[in-house]
Image (spheres, grey):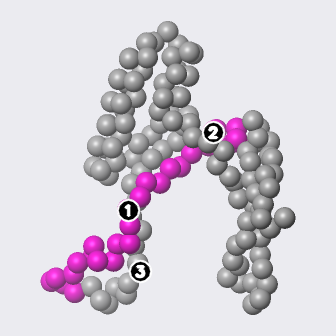
């Protein structure tokens, strides 16, 4: 199955004024959800659907708990998840010794996914690409 992409407009901060830029971006073709994963695992194994749902639900809860505890979640042969914080930079000289609130500089909290090297290598080596229609090529 190919990875679909389309050509979209983008900005180039180092580019010349008045010049339009374009780049290729992967396009989502659908969702592979909890139900689909459960059905695929059930088909590929001897486990019952109820057992699979119970295991995946418990795994989800443990992952959430451990991310909030600051731990990195390592899923062997898939990748690792870790909570991260996006923050504004500030001069160290503005940090007072008494009442500094660093949370006022935090822009957001997210989860970073770092794929396992073998998974990334597999996707790169076995990729097929398919371009879908784009407004820029109309």
What is the x, y in percent for residue 48? 43, 12
Q: Quadrant of residue 95?
A: bottom left
| Label 1 – label 2 distance at C-alpha | 26 Å
Q: Work out whether residue 28 or residue 90 is closer to the camera in this orientation and state it.
A: 28
- Give the number of the disc on residue 109: 1
Q: Earlier in the sequence, mark 2 or mark 3?
A: 3
> Which mark is in front, 1 or 2?
1
- Give the number of the disc on residue 95: none
- At x 71%, y 78%, the residue is 12
- Give the number of the disc on residue 119: 2
What is the x, y in percent for residue 50? 38, 17
- At x 69%, y 77%, the residue is 11
Is residue 23 visible to the viewer in this orientation of the structure?
Answer: no
Label 2 residue SS: helix
Which stretch is magenta?
96-124
Which residue is label 3 attached to? 89
Label 1 residue SS: strand
Asked if the residue under mark 2 is in contact with the one under mark 1, i.e. CB atoms within 8 Å, the reply is: no
């Amino acid at each position: 199955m190919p990875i679909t992409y389309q050509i979209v407009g983008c900005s180039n901060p180092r580019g010349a004024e008045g010049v339009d830029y374009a780049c290729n971006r992967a396009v989502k073709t659908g969702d592979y959800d909890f139900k689909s994963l459960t059905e695929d695992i059930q088909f590929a194994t001897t486990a019952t659907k109820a057992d699979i749902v119970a295991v995946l639900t418990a795994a989800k809860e443990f992952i959430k708990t451990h991310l909030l505890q600051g731990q990195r979640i390592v899923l062997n042969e898939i990748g690792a998840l870790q909570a991260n914080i996006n923050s504004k930079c500030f001069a160290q000289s503005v940090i007072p010794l008494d009442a500094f609130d660093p949370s006022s500089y935090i822009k957001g909290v997210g989860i970073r996914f770092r794929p396992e090297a073998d998974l990334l290598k597999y996707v790169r080596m076995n990729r097929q690409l398919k371009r879908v229609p784009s407004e820029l090529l109309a």
